[in-house]
Amino acid sequence: MNDPKAHGIVVAGMRSSDGKTAVTCALLAAFAERGLPIQPFKVGPDFIDPGNHGRFIESPSRIWTHG
């Protein structure tokens, strides 16, 4: 995409239990509280996080898998 209006944040960690889900959910809650348009994505094999993401926003998290 070459849309100059497209913005994103990547939350990453070196290993499991680094707090990625906690940080992501806190950001989603803060953005939703401010009325910002948000769409979370989950990359990788763990399919539990999208359910957690959806608890903080009104649309489901999308899952992106490698190719």
Image (cartoon, grey):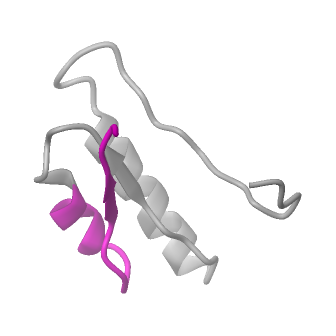
Task: State the quadrant of the C terminus.
Answer: top left
Instruction: Locate residue 59 relative to residue 5 in the image: left or right.
Output: left
- Nearest to the observer: residue 51 or residue 66: 66
Instruction: Locate residue 12 relative to residue 60 in the image: left or right.
Output: right
Residue at 24% x, 15% y is 15
Residue at 36% x, 82% y is 59
11, above or below 48, in the image: above
Q: Where are the magenta residues, as a range?
A: 50-67
Residue extending farthest to the front is 67
- The spot of residue 42 in percent (x, y) is 33, 50
50, above or below 42, in the image: below
Residue at 28% x, 32% y is 19
- The spot of residue 7 in percent (x, y) is 72, 55
Task: State the quadrant of the N terminus.
Answer: bottom right
Residue at 49% x, 69% y is 39
- The spot of residue 66 in percent (x, y) is 33, 37
Inspect the magenta stretch and tell me whether residue 29 lies in it: no
- The spot of residue 41 in percent (x, y) is 40, 56
25, above or below 34, in the image: above
Q: Quadrant of residue 9?
A: top right
Residue extending farthest to the top is 14
Q: How many marks?
A: 0
Instruction: Locate residue 38 relative to residue 6 in the image: left or right.
Output: left
Q: Quadrant of residue 38?
A: bottom right
Instruction: Locate residue 58 relative to residue 3 in the image: left or right.
Output: left
- Nearest to the observer: residue 17 or residue 46: 46
